[in-house]
Amino acid sequence: MIALFSALALAASVLYVHPDRLLSARFPSKPVVTDQDTPSAVGIIRSKGASLKTERGSYSVTAIVYPVGGTLDVEAVLNGARDQTLKSNNAKAVSEAQIRVDGLPGREVRFESGAHVQGVTRIFARAGPPVLFAITATSKEPDPEVEKFLDSVHFGRSIETK
């Protein structure tokens, strides 16, 4: 019975696979896909991902690929991504922990904003080739979809394709 429920839950979700196969995630329904190139002093920074806003909350995954040959200070990038997430959500961190998913080290930051929104961001950085991964989910009240979404994210050879 549990296996049937799990299979039905997966069937109800929508799989997103990054076009360069850097990550995969399961959204509660069809996300909006984004693709943006930004010029920088070190070359073109490519950001690709997907996001979804529902009545219950929001979900997003992004892979930001820095130019080959660029350098990436992993700790500085993780700190910057955390600070930017808190700023853009007008939030304060409630907790922060080091995590590892599919061998990739990162951080999980749980936060709250003045709008009674609670959220979680998981950020990962890879030095070479340089990539920043950001996975964020928010909700106005505890929602099992948030944890299910976060736990569905995989990287590299562990991505889901079906």
Image (cartoon, helix red, strand yellow):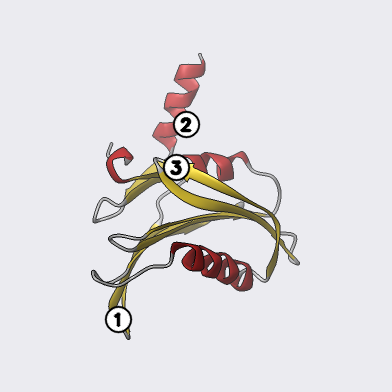
x and y, in percent, of residue 74 in the image: 44, 62
- Give how far apart the Cα atoms at labels 2 and 3 are: 22 Å
In the image, residue 41 above or below residue 25 = below
- Give how far apart the Cα atoms at labels 1 and 2 are: 43 Å
Q: Earlier in the sequence, mark 1 or mark 2?
A: 2
Q: Nearer the viewer, residue 59 or 37?
A: 37
The picture quadrant where one finds residue 137 is bottom right
Q: Residue at x 28, y 61 (%)?
A: 129
Q: Which residue is mark 2?
A: 9
- Amino acid at the residue labelled 2: Ala
Q: Earlier in the sequence, mark 1 or mark 3?
A: 1
Q: Nearer the viewer, residue 155 or 80?
A: 80
Kindly report which numbered mark, 2 or 3, lies closer to the viewer in this rendering. 3
Give the class, few, some or many, for how many residues have Cα within 10 Å of label 2's Cα (few <14, many ≥20).
Answer: few
Specify whether 137 is left or right of 69.
right
- Amino acid at the residue labelled 1: Val
| Residue at disc 2, secondary structure | helix
Q: Is residue 35 visible?
A: no
Q: Which mark is residue 42?
A: 1
